[in-house]
Image (cartoon, rainbow, N blue to C red):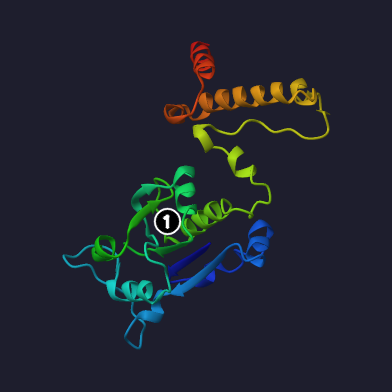
């Protein structure tokens, strides 16, 4: 999978593939990233990419020409999503990450200043995404979040194909608690069921803990959780406690 990023600050992405899982995935050719400096597509000696907004107002707005030309210069397949990062976009969730991971290529536009000319949104971007109800100085950090989340879903990146299926938010639930050695630390023991070797009981315990944790921390997620009839009854009992 390849992700092409349009940015005014490509140096911010230095090191994103230099460590851990992403480094191994890039070395194996499973993922790659292309960085494109929007200033390279400006047409004046000062490499101007922004201007004052028509109608007045604070701040500067990114001009449409360099953004359009940068996207059009990318070698991309037909139907490749062109994503504008913006606080006005749809919320980035694990479900959106899984959706994006189904593509072999993405193009991400990092906004800056007061935003981009509206014609970019209307006539160039095919999607608009926000990583949360907050405002950043630019889209670069948001792009890194999306890249890290999407690339780990590419087959082979994590090594184990089962790993992404146990993440929080998969199936609408937060992930169950994890424990490792020692079995007792400062008087805090590991739950006995995890030491039992009974995989059926362990599976049931983990599922119940995931439901409990989601109800306590993110109850709104349960509206779209994939629960069996037995788990629905468990949820009702937990809500009455």
Q: Residue furthest bottom?
A: 45
Q: Nearer the viewer, residue 108 or 75?
A: 75
In the image: residue 149, left or right of residue 39: right
Q: Is residue 63 visible?
A: no
Q: Residue sitting at 61 percent across and 25 percent down?
A: 207
Look at the numbered disc 1 and give the secondary structure of its residue.
Answer: loop
Locate residue 109, reporting x and y percent.
Answer: 39, 64
Q: Give the class, few, some or many, for how many residues have Cα within 10 Å of label 1's Cα (few <14, many ≥20).
A: few
Q: Residue sitting at 82 percent across and 34 percent down?
A: 181
Q: Compared with residue 61, is residue 145 higher up or lower down, i.e. above or below?
A: above
Total labels: the figure holds: 1
Residue bearing mark 1:
136
Q: Residue sitting at 53 percent across and 67 percent down?
A: 33
Q: Compared with residue 119, is residue 179 higher up or lower down, i.e. above or below?
A: above
Q: Residue furthest front?
A: 78
**Where is residue 67, by image quadrant?**
bottom left
**Where is residue 162, by image quadrant?**
top right
Locate residue 113, reporting x and y percent.
Answer: 35, 64
In the image: residue 178, left or right of residue 189: left
Q: Is residue 159 visible?
A: yes
Q: Residue sitting at 49 percent across and 53 percent down?
A: 101
Locate residue 194, reporting x and y percent.
Answer: 75, 26
């Amino acid at each position: 999978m390849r992700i092409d990023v349009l940015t005014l600050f490509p140096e911010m992405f230095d090191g994103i593939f230099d460590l851990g899982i992403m480094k191994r995935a890039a070395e194996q050719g499973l993922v790659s990233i292309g960085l494109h400096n929007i200033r390279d597509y400006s047409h004046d000696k000062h490499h101007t990419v922004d201007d004052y907004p028509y109608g007045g107002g604070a701040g500067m707005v990114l001009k449409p020409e360099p953004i359009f030309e940068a996207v059009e210069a990318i070698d991309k397949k037909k139907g490749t999503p062109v994503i504008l990062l913006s606080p006005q976009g749809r919320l980035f969730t694990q479900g959106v990450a899984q959706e994006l991971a189904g593509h072999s290529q993405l193009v991400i536009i990092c906004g800056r200043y007061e935003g981009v000319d509206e014609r970019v949104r209307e006539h160039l971007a095919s999607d608009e995404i926000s990583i949360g109800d907050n405002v950043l100085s630019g889209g670069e950090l948001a792009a890194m979040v999306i890249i890290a989340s999407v690339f780990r879903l590419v087959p082979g990146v994590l090594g184990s194909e089962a790993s992404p299926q146990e993440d929080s938010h998969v199936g609408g639930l937060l992930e169950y608690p994890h424990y490792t050695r020692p079995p007792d630390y400062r008087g805090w023991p590991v739950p006995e069921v995890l030491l039992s070797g009974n995989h059926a009981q362990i599976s049931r315990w983990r599922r119940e803990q995931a439901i409990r944790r989601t109800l306590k921390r993110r109850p709104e997620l349960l509206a779209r959780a994939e629960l069996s009839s037995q788990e629905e009854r468990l949820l009702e009992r937990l809500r009455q406690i």
